[in-house]
Image: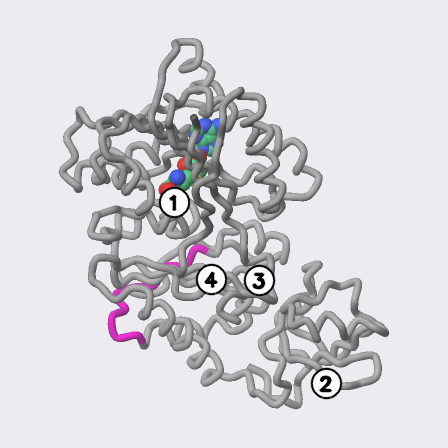
Amino acid sequence: MPPSNELGVVTLKKGKESIIKSRHPWIFSGAIANVENVSVNGQLVIVKSYQKENLAIGSYSQNSQISVRIWSFDTDLIIDKNFFVERFNNALQLRKSIFQSEDTNAYRIINSESDLLPGLIVDYYAGYYVVQFLSASAEFFRDIIIQIIKAQNDCLGIYERSDTESREKEKLQQFNRILYGNFQPDKILFKENGLSFYADLSNGHKTGFYLDQRDNRLLVQKFSYGKNVLNCFSYTGGFSIYAINGGASFVTNIDSSESALKMSDENHSINNIPKNKFQNIEGDVFKLLRKFRDENKKFDLIILDPPKFADSEPNITKASRGYKDINLLSMKLLNKGGILFTFSCSGHISLELFRKIINSAANDSGKNVKIIKQLTQSSDHPIVINFPESFYLKGFVCYVE
Ligand code: SAH
């Protein structure tokens, strides 16, 4: 880390200091008047108003539209190892208060801006830490961050999944590798709410598992007793295993990924679930929902947890059509009094828009649909008031009459 006299200086355009006053941790390139003394990507900078008032300390990204990610609005703070230790411990303390039992030993410890550490993700799976340096800001402090993780008492290994699109945008090299320890990263066994799962840290989605759906899986379990369940976009079987644990009579899982379904099979097996309780179908949800409709199939509970349909603003209209399509078909496939768990993890689809899409699907289905619960991401993925982008997962539990 450079000594403080090597701080770069970013001066904002006139009037743009309002961004900082709202405590949003990003400064876009368009708000910047001038950049001085920055030689290294991710280097620390002091952010000044046009009138030269010190506003914040952040890291400067040379290749991103988000030019500065803020570490602190206290400009006297020194961004050194102690700073990161404290932020890490604060984040850990929150998780310790959420996960007090041994029943769950996989969770997100650092959720980037939500834990005031922009660009850094740290997930924990039963002693193994998976780290993602998403931006130049986090990349700049890589060594310190790895030292802090290594120093955790329970650290058996560290895996790096810095193979994200965000790094591509920042022109940072992609990494998918073991950083510390000697272990097989493709099959890490962990527990969630007393159930067992494998995560593939090297090839799995995100860091291996959708930890953000943990709380919603528990709710599915509560609703599943005696029900014939259809689990769309099932990945490695998370919702299915909870549903069967909650007494579902049968679960049909659909996913397009052969490797995800293979792990789904293994996850069912390690929870001693008999083969006559579920089936894994490899296929396209859009096509299979239509096939089920034509075959007059019915279900009591349907889960729709699709991948991000809208990854940018121009895609919102097309994505909305996709969401409406699968929701409309699902509403029609439900028996009277059926339950629909429906999600959108697209940051670009607002809660309001998602509600409108569900409303429109309900109207076209000709059924009476009631939202009985509103859902979001699990509590280890906190939502920060000053950073609305941290609220990305929206869901509804619908009662379909
Ligand atoms: N519900 C899962 C996470 C779903 S992630 C869980 O809780 O673990 C989205 C999944 O959708 C991925 O596994 C991906 O392989 C699958 N997928 C993407 N497009 C699909 C499609 N058109 N049909 C079926 N599966 C699809």
Q: Label 2 is placed on what type of residue?
A: Asn
Q: Nearer the viewer, mark 4 or mark 3?
A: 4
Q: Please state which of the two labelled residues, at mark 2 or mark 1, is closer to the viewer.
A: 2
* Render colour scheme: one colour
Q: Nearer the viewer, residue 28 or 385?
A: 385
Q: Earlier in the sequence, mark 2 or mark 1?
A: 2
Residue 333 versus residue 212: which sits nearer the camera?
Answer: 333
Disc number placed over residue 54 in the picture, else none: 2
Task: Pinpoint residue 80: horizontal percent, then vertical percent.
Answer: 51, 84
Q: CA separation, marks 2 and 1? A: 44 Å
User: In the rendered structure, which segment of residues is drawn in magenta?
Assistant: 152-161
Residue under label 3: 135
Q: CA distance from mark 4 to mark 3?
A: 20 Å
Q: Residues within 10 Å of mark 4 (few under 14, many from 20)?
A: many
Q: Going from the N terminus, do you reach mark 1 or mark 4 first?
A: 1
Q: Nearer the viewer, residue 387 or 399?
A: 399
- Work out whether mark 2 precedes mark 4 in sequence or the reverse, and give the earlier one: 2
